[in-house]
Structure formats: C-alpha cells, structure tokens
Image (spheres, rainbow, N blue to C red):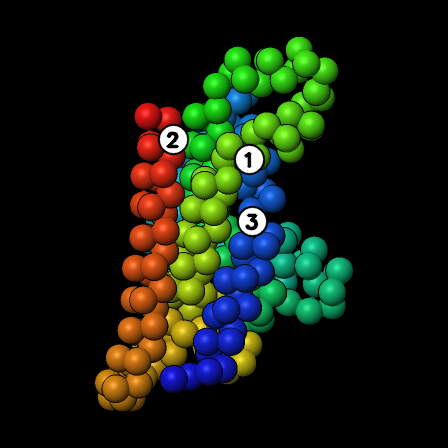
C-alpha cells in the first residue's frame, strides 16, 4: 500500500467535500427554487464534467492554470506560485470536476420540498434564512449526505484530470489512482491489486449509502 499516495488522496477528497458542500447547498437550492433566464445553460455547465472526457477537462484546466492565462496569472499574483503541478492546482481541478456530484443530489432533494411548506414557514414569521436552517435543511439532509459521499468517492478515484494538471509528484500530487497506474506500469500487480481493492470497497460502500438514502426518502414520502 502506498500510504503517501493514500494520504494525498484523503486530503484531496476531504478538502473537496469541505469546500464544495456549501456551494452545493447554495446552488442546489437556487436551481431547485428559482426560475431565471439561462438556468438550463447553468445546469448544463454544471453537468458537463459528467460527459466530458477527464483528459479533455484536464487539458483545458492545464492551459488556464498556466502563468500566461488570466486565472494562473491571478493566482501567481496572490500567492507567488503557480497552480500546475501543485496540490492547490489539483484541489481546484477537483472542485471543478466534482461540481455535478456535489450539486445535483442536493438540487433533487430541494426539489422534493413542497413549495407550500416554505410559504407556510414565511407566513409563520420565519425569514428565508430561518426557513432554510429550521425547515429545509432537516428535510434535505439525505441529499447532502449523498452529495458528500459521491464527491468523496469520485475524488478518490479521479485519474485523468489530476494527472493532467498535477502530474505524479510524490507527496504533492500523486494520488492513489495514479499510484495504481504506476504499479501496473512497474508490473507490481499485487501492489496494484491491494490499492484497487481499497478503492473498490470505498465505491461499493458509497453506492450502498447513496441507494440506501434514496430508499429511505421513498419510504418516508410513501
């Protein structure tokens, strides 16, 4: 087991969840409750990482993270360093690649909250912020938990985007998925098998959690 690569993967997955879940709650609720021009385009852009090949997404991010690009130049002016081939770079790439996994489950959960429930809360004197905290969040927590599980598991297994943006720098950007590829290239099938089994276990556990929560929501509504 490559413990250094596992540590990088866990740190990357944890920070991705930490930063994306608040964004997922805000955008998920907005997309579920608001009607505005360009909403379809916004949803399409969020879902784009689901269908775009990871290497293509990684290629475009690699270009935008360069010091000659506006984003890379802005980051360099703030920190004095670059984004490509750094942990900060793969974290930002992970945030972008995981947008649909963090937002869509939460959006679907908010869509299942009856509109008249929000209106009743407002009539009772609750502000929109209080309604969110006291009424809506307790109802949509399965969606939030599903989003966290999917985001965490997808980040652990992400390969193409991370490799394109970060390379394979040990202790910095070399994740468990990249370590598996390296072990296969070195004909270390046993090492690759152990790390693959860990990711398989995480994936199965995540899917079990997600489908279990989906079944719970159907049971509660029934």
**Residue under the point 48% across and 24% down:** 113
Which corner quadrant of the image does residue 136 belong to?
top right
- Horizontal side, residue 14 vs residue 123: left or right: left
**In the rendered image, is residue 143 in sight?**
yes
Q: Which numbered circle lies on residue 199?
A: none
Say above or below: 68 vs 140: below
The residue pinned by badge 1 equals 138
Mark 2 residue element:
helix
Q: Which numbered circle lies on residue 220?
A: 2
Say above or below: 191 vs 45: below
**Residue under the point 50% across and 62% down:** 13
Q: Are marks 3 and 1 in contact (CB under 8 Å)?
A: no
The residue pinned by badge 3 equals 20
Quote the CA–CA distance across marks 2 and 1. 13 Å
Mark 3 residue element:
helix
Residue at the extreme top of the image, as rendered: 123
Judge depth for marks 2 and 1 and give the one in front. Answer: 2
Mark 2 surroundings within 10 Å by alpha-carbon count, few (fewer than 14), some (14 through 19), many (20 or more): few
Give how far across and how far down residue 117 sits, in percent: 54, 17
Judge depth for marks 2 and 3 and give the one in front. Answer: 2
**Residue under the point 56% across and 49% down:** 20
Total numbered labels: 3
Q: Quadrant of the N terminus?
A: bottom left
**In the rendered image, is residue 68 in sight?**
no
Q: Are marks 2 and 3 in contact (CB under 8 Å)?
A: no
- Horizontal side, residue 193 vs residue 115: left or right: left
Which corner quadrant of the image does residue 160 belong to?
bottom left
Quote the CA–CA distance across marks 3 and 1. 19 Å
Judge depth for marks 3 and 1 and give the one in front. Answer: 1
Give how far across and how far down residue 54 sits, in percent: 37, 57
């Amino acid at each position: 087991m490559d413990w250094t690569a596992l540590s990088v993967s866990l740190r990357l997955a944890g920070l991705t969840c930490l930063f994306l879940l608040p964004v997922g709650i805000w955008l998920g609720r907005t997309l579920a409750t608001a009607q505005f021009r360009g909403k379809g385009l916004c949803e399409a852009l969020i879902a784009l990482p689901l269908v775009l090949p990871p290497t293509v997404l990684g290629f475009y991010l690699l270009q935008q993270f360069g010091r000659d690009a506006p984003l890379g130049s802005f980051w360099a002016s703030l920190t004095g360093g670059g984004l490509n081939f750094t942990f900060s770079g793969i974290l930002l790439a992970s945030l972008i690649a995981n947008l649909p996994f963090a937002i869509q489950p939460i959006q679907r959960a908010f869509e299942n909250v009856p509109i008249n429930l929000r209106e009743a809360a407002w009539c009772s004197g609750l502000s929109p912020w209080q309604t969110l905290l006291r009424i809506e969040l307790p109802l949509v927590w399965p969606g939030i938990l599903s989003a966290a599980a999917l985001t965490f598991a997808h980040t652990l297994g992400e390969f193409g985007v991370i490799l394109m943006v970060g390379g394979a720098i040990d202790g910095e950007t070399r994740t468990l998925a990249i370590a598996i590829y390296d072990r296969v290239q070195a004909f270390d099938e046993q090492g690759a098998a152990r790390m693959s089994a860990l990711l398989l276990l995480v994936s199965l556990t995540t899917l079990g959690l997600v489908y279990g929560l989906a079944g719970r929501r159907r049971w509660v509504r029934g």
